[in-house]
Image: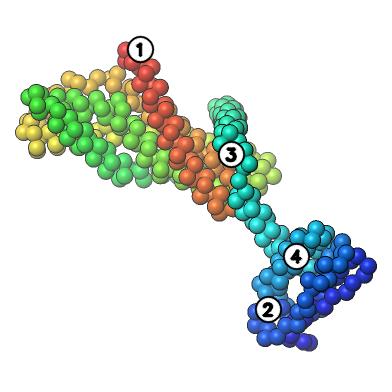
Amino acid sequence: MTTECALQTNRDEDRLCLIFLGSWTIHTPQCSIPDIHPLFSSPVKTLCFNTDNLNEWDSRLLVELSRILDLAASQSITVDDQGLPPGIRRLLQLTRTNSDQLAAAKKTSPFGLLADIGNHTLGFFRESHEMLTFTGEIILAYSRFFLGRARFLKNDFFYFLYDCGPQSLPIVTLISFLVGVILAFVGAVQLKMFGADIYIADLVGLGMTREMGAMMAAIILAGRTGASFAAQLGTMQVNEEIDALKTMGINPIDFLVLPRMTSLIMMMPLLALWADFIGILGGFFIGCLTLDISASLYYEQTIKAITLNHFSVGLIKSAVFGYLVAFCGCLKGLQCGRSASSVGQATTSAVVTAIVFIVMADAAFTFLFNILGV
């Protein structure tokens, strides 16, 4: 058995066959490779390969084959790769696909700005259609759930309850306390000028219960839990686990989306209430420690300022925010491609989309509640 590598050619009219001999590895010291450029210059229509006498191979053979395929492509020669081992064919197909994607990415549109605007517009309508379709699937899934026909694991549901709720308390507590402190300091700068320091309690209380408590909890959960949902489902998409569920007759929306979405919708109002309390506590510390407001006076002013309507506004917003975070995380995860980079893109897109939707929904709720006088 020869340990050297060699390349021979066999010409049959317009068909050129390359014969690989020996061991094509990086450890092979010598390799007899003829100059095949003159052969391609003559009228060759088909290129084939013979690896019957190929002992072993590694990346060295792939590099040489890539060079030969590039040369054949430049001469518009048809390539018949059936003579190559299956492993080499798969690797070559993968490298050619990546090369085509990079070339397409580098290719600029000849129409410039107008083409980009048109492409983004079409992408917007396509994304809107996918979101509406996913919304319909969720409605059908909850219909099956209330009829007792949805199938998912109870252990998964309780795990997501724990992950969305108690596991999120430390970061929600820290951020909410700091938001309360910031609101108190910002209010103190202006209210101190008019001797109305006591109204800091109103500012912090109303700001946390109506706006900041629910919004900050939702944004934190978008970066923490929404990204986790997208990464989990995206990885399952890459590993073809979702396809396996469909093959077994299990609806992925019921099995994967329902427990995640339900747990987040249930936990978000509780986290918002906790964020309200911690934010008010942060304003309490600033008011009592730096502004010389007595604790009892601050407490009484806070109780007077906050009503049940204010808490209700925050709870309604938080439930909707929880749905939006779970919606974006699950949607982007299910839309994920089949590569590791697609998982990262899905995770990033889930967080960004969720935050945009949260801000838009909060603005809409603020406008609506202002009209209703709530």
Q: Earlier in the sequence, mark 3 or mark 4?
A: 4
Q: Which residue is mark 4?
A: 71
Q: Secondary structure at mark 1?
A: helix
Q: Residues within 10 Å of mark 4 (few under 14, many from 20)?
A: some
Q: Quadrant of residue 204?
A: top left
Q: Residues within 10 Å of mark 1 (few under 14, many from 20)?
A: few
Given this view, does label 1 or label 3 mark the residue nearer the observer? 3
Q: Secondary structure at mark 2?
A: loop
Contact? badges 1 and 3 (CB < 8 Å)? no
Q: Which of the labelled discs sits on residue 25, or is there none?
A: 2
Going 62% across and 54% down the picture, which residue do you hit? 102
**How far, Cα to Cα, is label 3 from label 2?**
47 Å
Q: Quadrant of residue 170?
A: top left
Asked if residue 157 can be seen in this view, the reply is no
Q: Residues within 10 Å of mark 2 (few under 14, many from 20)?
A: some
**How far, Cα to Cα, is label 1 from label 3?**
47 Å
